[in-house]
Amino acid sequence: MNTKYFLPFAFAALLGFSACEKKDDHSGKATLKVSLTDAPGDFDQVNVEVLGLEVNKSTQETESGWQPLTMKETGLINLLDLTNGKSALLASSELPAGKISQIRLKLGTNNTLKLKDGRTVNLTTPSGQTAGLKLQINQELEAGVTYEILLDFDAAKSIVKRGNSGQYNLKPVIRTITQAVAGGIRGKVTPSAAKAGILILNAAATDTLAGGFADPATGDFLIKGISAGSYKVEFSSVAPYQEKLTRDVTVTNTAIADMGN
């Protein structure tokens, strides 16, 4: 079985924008809350050092437009503690209504993996990453409206093993999702001992959009940030269970599609 099926997990920041004043669209304040969530991966721990978050209200590529958010939690965060809908609040700030063009996630260099064999190894971080990862948002904040944005950290593409050296690089690949116009997929894999890995594919099964693992104790899974549409859900299990099974599912905006057992 291809081991990449056991790598995907999602590191996600949930950004809630809620206006506090109702004058005109650009005169009020909006509250920005950033939370972190994840889906299980094929490691015992994935520890990522979060230093800060900033938003950019300028359309120009200059440092003057960046505004730091008030952090509620920084330091090492084990992404695997945040699974199946759990989240941790990272930041909360009031922002003027108007347009946000980008968000910048600042990561440190003290990132580590705890492997299944008990070893802890460093995740080498490219030097340029300490300046922050810039992600396009282009979201207009209007007074009286609540916005939610999801940042989905794709570990299958972001954690890269360096040949046979036993070392790993962290090269973040992150997608942005507007949570207000996105749904999700939930279900239950039985028996839970199958330790199912889950991939969300497009209807043609030509592209992997998201992934995760069923909870090893209960078999439950929940994958958020899936836009409306038709998908194939691929389940890969450990021996002696059926190695691979694919089912079709349809997601509607803001709704969680329940696949049942």
Image (cartoon, grey):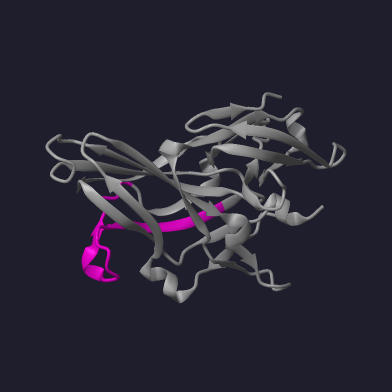
* Farthest residue, direction top: 260
The answer to whether any part of residue 43 appears in the image is: no
The answer to whether any part of residue 228 appears in the image is: yes
Q: Is residue 67 magenta?
A: yes
Q: Is residue 180 magenta?
A: no
Residue 127 screen position, x and y as percent: 45, 75
In the image, is 194 to the left or to the right of 66? right
* Farthest residue, direction bottom: 127
Camera-side residue: 37 or 217? 37
**In this view, 67 is above or below 165:** above
Residue 142 screen position, x and y as percent: 24, 41
Camera-side residue: 163 or 32? 32
Camera-side residue: 38 or 30? 30
Instruction: Tell me the magenta residue range.
Output: 46-72
Q: Residue at x 15, y 34 (%)?
A: 22
In the image, is 227 to the left or to the right of 194? left
> Can you say which quadrant of the picture contains the C terminus?
top right
* Farthest residue, direction right: 240
Q: Residue at x 27, y 35 (%)?
A: 145
Q: Residue at x 58, y 51 (%)?
A: 45
In the image, is 159 to the left or to the right of 135? right
* Number of numbered discs: 0
Residue 190 screen position, x and y as percent: 75, 27
Residue 49 screen position, x and y as percent: 44, 58
Q: Residue at x 50, y 70 (%)?
A: 125
